[in-house]
Every structure is written in structure tokens, then in C-alpha cells.
Image: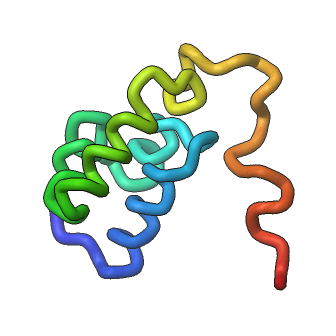
Amino acid sequence: MELLLEEESRIIEMAWEDRTPFEAIEHQFGMQEPAVIKFMRSRLKPRSFKLWRQRVSGRSTKHVQLRSENVTRAYCPTQYKNR
């Protein structure tokens, strides 16, 4: 799959976001979780990839089936405020 640089950046951003589930990445870009992991491994430095894996492993908000019904948005309200 050929991706534009902007799309690659957005996938990386979504993968790092705590409240964005892998299913959202799949819906938008057609990449299932194993493909996202492989993608991140190829795009990040080894240490960054290791930190990312530690961060998302076991995080219930990264999987729609595991997340609480109270989580209704993909980002923190203050995340995208203009500075």
C-alpha cells in the first residue's frame, strides 16, 4: 500500500494518541493492528518503537472492545487548542 507522507504522519500520530483505537486507524486507512505495529516498527527509531509498544500494550482505550462506554471522543479537549 502506497501512502502519502501526510497519511504516514497521521497514522503515526493516531497510533501514539491514547484515545484513538486501532479500529479507527483500520477504518480510515485499512490497516489492522498487526499492520500498524509493522508500520510503526519500520518508521520509528528502535527505542521510540519500544516506548510506543510499552505505552499501547494493555491500554484499554486502544481497543474499542476494551474501552469504557464513557470514552466517547478520540482526543483530550485541550489537545488541539490554538496556542
The quarter of the image holding the C terminus is bottom right
Outermost residue, front side: 47
Q: Nearer the viewer, residue 64 or 80?
A: 80
The structure residue drawn at horizontal position 52% and vertical position 37%, both measured from the top left corner, is 21
Residue 32 percent location from the top left of the image: 30, 37
Q: Relative to residue 38, is residue 33 drawn left or right? A: right
Q: Quadrant of residue 39?
A: bottom left
- The colour scheme used here is rainbow
- Asked if 61 appears above or below 36 in the picture, the reply is above
Q: Quadrant of residue 40?
A: bottom left
- Asked if 69 appears above or below 17 in the picture, the reply is above
The structure residue drawn at horizontal position 33% and vertical position 69%, both measured from the top left corner, is 8
Residue 71 percent location from the top left of the image: 76, 29
The quarter of the image holding the N terminus is bottom left
Q: Relative to residue 78, is residue 40 drawn left or right? A: left
Q: Nearer the viewer, residue 57 or 10?
A: 57
The structure residue drawn at horizontal position 30% and vertical position 79%, both measured from the top left corner, is 4
Q: Relative to residue 22, is residue 39 drawn left or right? A: left
Residue 61 percent location from the top left of the image: 59, 29
State the count of labels.
0
The structure residue drawn at horizontal position 22% and vertical position 35%, both measured from the top left corner, is 34
Q: Quadrant of residue 57?
A: top left
Q: Relative to residue 62, is residue 3 drawn left or right? A: left
